[in-house]
Image (tube, helix red, strand yellow):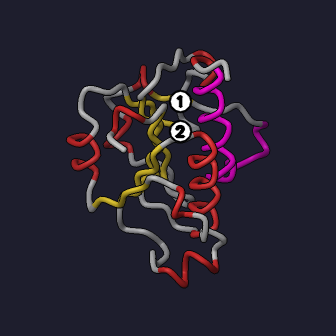
């Protein structure tokens, strides 16, 4: 599929846990979204590793791995990017999502680096949670945000 045929694009920046990536891929498959992975990963993307992480359905997923962030910016140029970070002031439910937009999530340990978010405050979103919670699981965050985006513009 070309980038324009996907309702949304989900980017995982340096994901560390194969199972979380697998679950995010399952969500993307269910929504018809494209999954982008920015290296390095904390796991190996090989057939047997994918099966072990429960990602053996990936033949149905449109996904791509890239070596650096600049490739994402170049390949998805002209689209609006949303950056999910617990440091954002704006709630994800306050954003108005449109088809073809890009939802960006950081790796499990460190989230998104400030170099990606510091000049894009208006495009940074957070999912609310109690102060006792350090963070949400990456795959849960992807599902919450992706389904909200689709809900806003797709009345299936």
Residue 57 drawn at (x, y percent): 60, 65
Which quarter of the rendering shows the C terminus? top right
Queried whether the magenta region covers residue 132, the answer comes back as yes
Which quarter of the rendering shows the N terminus? top left
User: Is 77 left or right of 80, judged from the image as shown?
Assistant: left
Queried whether the magenta region covers residue 18, the answer comes back as no
Residue under pointer 1: 88
User: Is 116 left or right of 142, judged from the image as shown?
Assistant: left
Residue at 34% x, 38% y: name it: 3
Residue at 20% x, 41% y: name it: 74
Say above or below: 71 vs 49: above
Residue at 45% x, 52% y: name it: 62
Q: Which residues are magenta?
A: 130-151
Cα gap from disc 2 to disc 1, whole angstroms: 6 Å
Q: Which mark is residue 85?
A: 2
Quadrant of the image occupied by residue 41: bottom left
Residue at 54% x, 17% y: name it: 95
What is the secondary structure assignment of the residue under circle 1?
A: loop
Residue 20 drawn at (x, y percent): 62, 61
Q: Which mark is residue 119?
A: none
Residue 84 drawn at (x, y percent): 52, 37
């Amino acid at each position: 599929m070309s980038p324009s045929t996907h309702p949304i694009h989900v980017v995982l920046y340096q994901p560390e846990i194969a199972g979380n990536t697998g679950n995010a891929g399952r969500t993307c498959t269910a929504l018809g979204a494209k999954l982008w992975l920015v290296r390095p990963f904390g796991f190996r993307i090989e057939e047997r590793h994918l099966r072990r992480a429960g990602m053996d359905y990936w033949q149905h997923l449109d996904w791509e791995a890239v070596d650096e962030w600049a490739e994402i910016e170049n390949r998805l140029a002209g689209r609006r990017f949303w950056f999910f970070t617990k440091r954002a002031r704006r709630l994800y439910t306050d954003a108005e999502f449109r088809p073809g937009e890009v939802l960006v999530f950081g790796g499990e340990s460190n989230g998104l680096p400030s170099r990606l978010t510091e000049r894009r405050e208006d495009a940074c979103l957070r999912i609310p949670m109690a102060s006792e919670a350090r963070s949400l699981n990456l795959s849960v965050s992807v599902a919450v945000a992706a389904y909200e985006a689709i809900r806003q513009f797709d009345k299936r």
